[in-house]
Amino acid sequence: MSYVTQVIGERGRYGPYGGRYVPETLMAPLEELERVYAEASHDPNFRSQLDDLLHNFAGRPTPLQFAPRLTEHLGGARIYLKREDLLHTGAHKINNCLGQGLLAVRMGKKRVIAETGAGQHGVATATVAARLGLSCTVYMGTEDMERQRLNVNRMRLLGAEVIGVQAGSRTLKDAINEAMRDWVTNVGTSHYLLGSVLGAHPYPQMVRDFQKIIGEEARAQILRVERRLPDHLFACVGGGSNSIGLFHAFLGDASVKMVGVEAGGRGKSLGEHAARLGAAGGFVGSRPGVLQGTYTYVLQSEDGQIAATHSISAGLDYAAVGPEHAWLADQGRAEYTAVGDDEAIVAARSLARLEGIIPALESAHAVAELIRRAPKMKKDEIVILNVSGRGDKDMETLSRYV
């Protein structure tokens, strides 16, 4: 099935999903951001500056590493790992933060606001703010602050103000709410540096464009090594930026199957998981709705209240998914599944002991799904799995299990 992105007027749409559902006070800054991003996209100087930072500051290109021991252990397809965990700050998040940081400078904004769950986006935002001379405020749920204390300390060392959010479930959804309230109050001086392919247009498109370098590199690298395209792509899906970053360069290749892996948490009942696209797996509570600026699949109660979510991984613990993923799921272009907490822990341990790579718990969800499927694949099949982040931040959690 072919995949077509629809853009309707000034509101980016992916089929029926996406759009711009925000208070009137945010329409002007969103329109400004859309205009400035469009101008920057056609400005060779902007591209050159971003490329220089990606290469000399962030450390791109990242390797596409063959995983010989994991391949042998699973006995199926040949497995390659896209090593986004080797980037400066330890995850793919810096790709987007560098792009948006340069846009903030271009717009004359002296301050950036961010939300963070696992802390990796917050660390990347604080890092870029320090590099570009911007002040930085990061909102983080206090539940996430407790399980990601290392990243809280990193952000503060980099000069960011980290504000704990006590409301609601005290996780990512609530941090986004507070960040948007801050932005409404300070639109003249501040840029909201949103961390995933979520929110009102142009964020889903813009963040995807800053992350699509992952798939562009992986495509060129696998063609150079194997002289053909992969058969399968695997990536975890929280908001969905690392996965759409990998998938985007292959969307036109019908032979390449794409698997996005959500958080199965500790059960299939509402409140026990974060599987927005996992209805086929028996996970309940997801249907289309509006959350924090965009129309997409949202975990919600029968009367439309946003549901609590759970994942051992703070970065996957969110009630909605990026609108482009919703459209890919509806079209059948990508398959979405879910992995539970315990499976993710086992997968993290397996990758560490077989390949010497400790993945972030987010990435470990994708590893777990690969471990489940690879033994059934043919030996001449090729898999690329995106290791979206490294596991330093999760060592306290991992140590309690391992």
Image (spheres, helix red, strand yellow):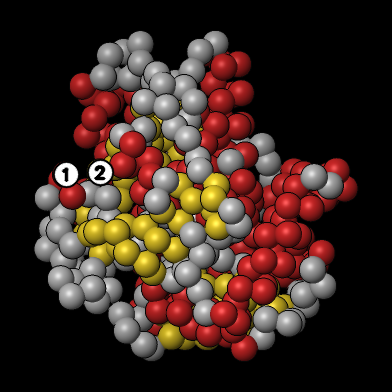
Q: Is mark 1 on a helix, strand or loop?
A: helix
- Identify the residue at image location x=45%, y=47%: 14
| Residue 85 in view in this figure | no
Q: Where is residue 9 in the image (x, y as percent from the top left)?
A: 59, 53
| Amino acid type, residue under disc 2 in the picture | Thr
- Identify the residue at image location x=72%, y=67%: 32
Q: Which of marks 1 and 2 is nearer the N terminus?
A: 1
Viewer-side residue, 281 vs 292 = 292
State the image quarter where residue 111 is shown: bottom right
Up-down relation of residue 153 to residue 371 (above or below): below
Q: Where is residue 229 in the image (x, y as percent from the top left)?
A: 49, 18
Viewer-side residue, 151 vs 184 = 184
Up-down relation of residue 221 to residue 57 (above or below): above
| Amino acid type, residue under disc 1 in the picture | Ala
Q: Is residue 344 left or right of residue 50?
A: left
Disc ID at residue 337 = 2
Q: What element carries label 2?
A: strand
Disc ID at residue 280 = 1
Q: Is residue 178 left or right of residue 102?
A: left
Where does the C terminus fall, quadrant-wise?
A: bottom left
Q: How crowded is mark 1: few (under 14 residues within 10 Å), some or many (20 or more)?
A: few
Q: Are circles 1 and 2 on residues that touch, CB within 8 Å? A: yes
State the image quarter where residue 238 is shown: bottom left
